[in-house]
Amino acid sequence: MSNEKPFAEIAGAGLAGLAAAAALAQRGWRVRVHERGRDLREIGAGIYLWQNALDALRELGVYDKVATIGAPSTTPRLLLDHRGQEVDLRRMSDWVPELIVILRTELHRILAECAVKHGAEIVTNSLVLGADPEGRLEFANGLGPKADLVIGADGVFSRVRDSLRLAVEIFDMKDGCGRHLIPRKDGDSINTRRIEMWNGGRRVGIAPTSKDFHYVFLCCPESDIQGRVQQPFNLEAWVSSHPQYREYLERLPRHPEEYWRPFFNVTCSSWTKGRVAIVGDAAHGMAPNLGQGAGVAIVNAVVMARALATSKDVPEALRRWEASERPYVERTQRMSFLYGYFGTRWPRKLLDLRSRILPLLARTDLYQRNFRVAIEHKPAI
Ligand SMILES: Cc1cc2nc3c(=O)[nH]c(=O)nc-3n(C[C@H](O)[C@H](O)[C@H](O)COP(=O)(O)OP(=O)(O)OC[C@H]3O[C@@H](n4cnc5c(N)ncnc54)[C@H](O)[C@@H]3O)c2cc1C
């Protein structure tokens, strides 16, 4: 690196790319983000931000904005089984981590504003085709300028990752979810406690996400054809499995913005090659069951900027960053998959058994350690 500001090129202006842009720009990097879309956008849904993500957002200086706009969740979630009975997965001795649920569009806007405020440039309509390990992005008209650092934050089907042959497996879990918003009303029982209710392979979750909206997620396996029909919304199918939430389900528009989307688990041989690093779903796409995909991406972006601040040798700093962050993220991926197995894949004939086994399992140290591995992770850097 010369005495000039170090230069980073980032592919993808999703939550991971913007967090990386903000973290690097704050530490004096010249940053350019390439977004293939015509506009910067996120979907209209909510997102859970657990304590680890909130700490990283504090480091970026945007926690207060997130806390003002989002809905803090101070009471533990109510999990109900197929009979409407509470399944209590808590241990009284456990501390309750901080959680804020916020509109994705707002989080995305806050991160974009933070990156731009610190000098990052965001170029839309800029499709990246790949990268070379020496530090160049590839576009339709050839290679871009040499950068000190290139980041692939271009999602599950990352071209940057694939051009460097870093993916080992992109596993379709045959499971998925639709994410929606419904109007919030005074007197809603959900206003005071977020809920999740499981019936068969279907899961309904509802959480306040802003002063005007509740976030609703409707998860079911790919094989559940009726459950998957969420655009237009198959109200009858979801009311038949979750009649006690009819009044909330009825608030979903017949043609919601979102539809059922499949979950993918991404495994890579490495998150770095030379001067290139991959972050976010490109590196560790996971089932969203622990609400951590974006959370760990934001943490990783902040920790990467810290690692780069302590060394002028970019490939070495990236290797150190990967060694610190990858093990706990992979545990989070596995735990999220397992949680989804219980929620969606458990045999229908054994649902009562599920309700009995889960609380016992959840109270073991092994479960708690893995369930909280991302929340409690303390980066070595
Ligand atoms: C149902 C569901 C619920 C979830 N809930 C939570 C939750 O509560 N909490 C949580 O932390 N996580 C949650 N997640 C996970 C979280 O949404 C993702 O991990 C996160 O959004 C990934 O962000 P990303 O920036 O890595 O990827 P993306 O959001 O996919 O962004 C990639 C960006 O790169 C752009 N791009 C792609 N290819 C190119 C290219 N070739 N050139 C240029 N630009 C490109 C795209 O247009 C996009 O803007 C959930 C996921 C799902 C599916």
Image (cartoon, helix red, strand yellow):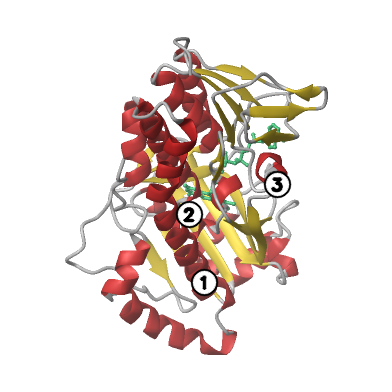
Looking at the rendering, the quadrant in which ligand 1 lies is top right
> Residue pushed farthest right?
141
Compared to 21, does 242 lie above or below?
below
Q: Disc 3 designates what residue?
A: 162
- Residues tagged 2 and 1 counted as in contact (Cβ below 8 A): no
Q: Disc 1 designates what residue?
A: 343
Say which of 18 and 233 sits in front.
18
Check disc 3 and give the amino acid type: Asp
Which residue is depicted at the point 40% across and 53% down? 190
Q: Check mark 1 vs ligand 1: CB closer than 8 Å? yes or no.
A: no
Compared to 335, does 328 lie above or below?
above
- Residues tagged 2 and 3 counted as in contact (Cβ below 8 A): no
Mark 1: few, some, or many residues within 10 Å (few <14, many ≥20)?
Answer: many
Q: Secondary structure at mark 2?
A: strand
- Residues tagged 1 and 3 counted as in contact (Cβ below 8 A): no
Q: Gap in Å between the C-alphas at discs 2 and 3?
A: 36 Å
Check disc 2 and give the amino acid type: Ile
